[in-house]
Amino acid sequence: MRAAAFTELIGPDGVSVIDRPDPEPGPGEAVVDVDACAINRHDLWILEGESTMVDADELPFVSGLDVAGVVRAVGDGADVDPGDRVVLCPNETCGTCRFCRDGPENLCEAFSLYHGGLAERAVVAADRLVRLPDSVTATTAAALPTAYMTAYHMLRRADVGPGDLVFVPGATGGVGVASVQLADVMGARTIGTSSSAAKLDRVAALGLDHAIESDDPDEIRAAVSEVGTPDVVLNHLGGAYTAVGLDVVRRGGRMLVCGRTAGSVSEIDVPDLFLGHKRVEGSTMGTQRDLERLVGLVASGEFSPVIDATYPLEETGAAFAAMQARESVGKLVVTTDD
């Protein structure tokens, strides 16, 4: 089978299409014919050599978390059947720690993520597969797991509901777009930022209520305050935007942090935090039940995930170059169609 492997950790030029043996399922596993696999900044960090997960000794490395396709073969004890159309929940958990027992599963002490979807076939844990209704295509489904699960889980943890005001710095990336769309589904209003007016126009068409064209923290802080006082901040950027989020969120409000695109270290005003009774919570991915709910929302027409572009497997490097250039709005999806 063909696989788009990372052969050098140097960025998009480090992707090569190689041949690998077809996988065979073990007990509890399934082999999926991959129709589509979305890429994420998580993959790009590995490809750029910025992740501690993968080093040169593990090359060639096949990444890809967000797998959708058709079950090809199953091992003993698998609870799916050949021919089932499925999307993978990429969570990997130990199943035995107290967090796996009590939930939610993404608190698992050994939490990790699946890799291997940027290939024609992938062997996965069968119990992590979610069946797809006929109305949901593989390309659409592949856009859901990482970005939309992450956004949906944050919105649920923050108890976002009708009329709430949600601030989304960096509203034009994968998690940002997902946050805007899903907040709209929940009846909330949104404020979003980007340095690109064209990108903001596209997100406004998806339900963004207030657009701020800036990447300057001080300008953003002032502009958000002119709109109103957010109840919730969904922060996938980190860096300086953490302080901005805490400054603008209401007394007793909450900020969920799920990423570090703008920096892995943030400075905050501690007195404002405790005197304002504000909450800051870390959040990683979501749960398999979250993914099941998202598939249901798409099937019922509540929303459709935004896909900026699709790329054939041979052009996986070009997909990562587009992500690196930050020109896209929404998800980039690799497909195996010839």
Image: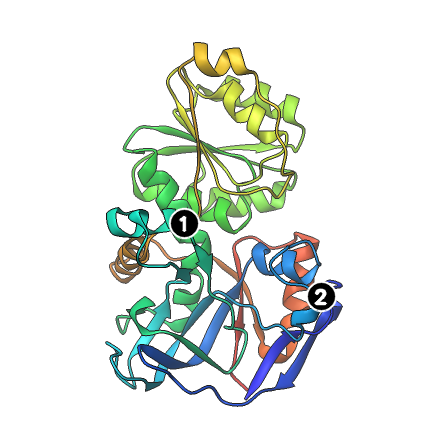
Residue 223 % position (x, y) = 57, 22
The amino acid on which the numbered mark 2 sits, given as a three-letter code, is: Pro
Q: Position of residue 89 (x, y in %)?
A: 37, 63
Q: Nearer the viewer, residue 228 or 13?
A: 13
Query: How far apart are the two marked residues, 1 and 2, measured between alpha carbons?
Result: 32 Å
Quadrant hosting residue 263: top right
- Residue 33 is left or right of residue 85, and the answer is right
Q: How is the image coloured?
A: rainbow
Q: Position of residue 70 (x, y in %)?
A: 36, 81
Which quadrant of the rendered structure holds the C terminus?
Answer: bottom right
Please identify, in this view, whether the residue under mark 1 or under mark 2 is nearer the observer: 1
Depth check: give the residue in front, 89 or 24.
Answer: 24
* Residue 11 picture quarter: bottom right
Q: Which residue is mark 1?
A: 109
Question: Which label's residue is closer to the chain start, 1 or 2?
Answer: 2
Total labels: the figure holds 2
- Mark 2 residue element: helix
- Height in image: 288 above or below 77? above
Q: Which label belongs to residue 257?
A: none
**Residue at 64% across / 23% down in the picture?**
219
Residue receiving disc 2: 12
Q: Amino acid at mark 1?
A: Glu
Under circle 1, the secondary element is loop
Q: Position of residue 53 (x, y in %)?
A: 60, 59
Question: Could you tell whether 31 is left or right of 117 in the image?
Answer: left
> How dense is the environment of label 2, judged by Cα within 10 Å: few (below 14), some, or many (20 and up)?
many
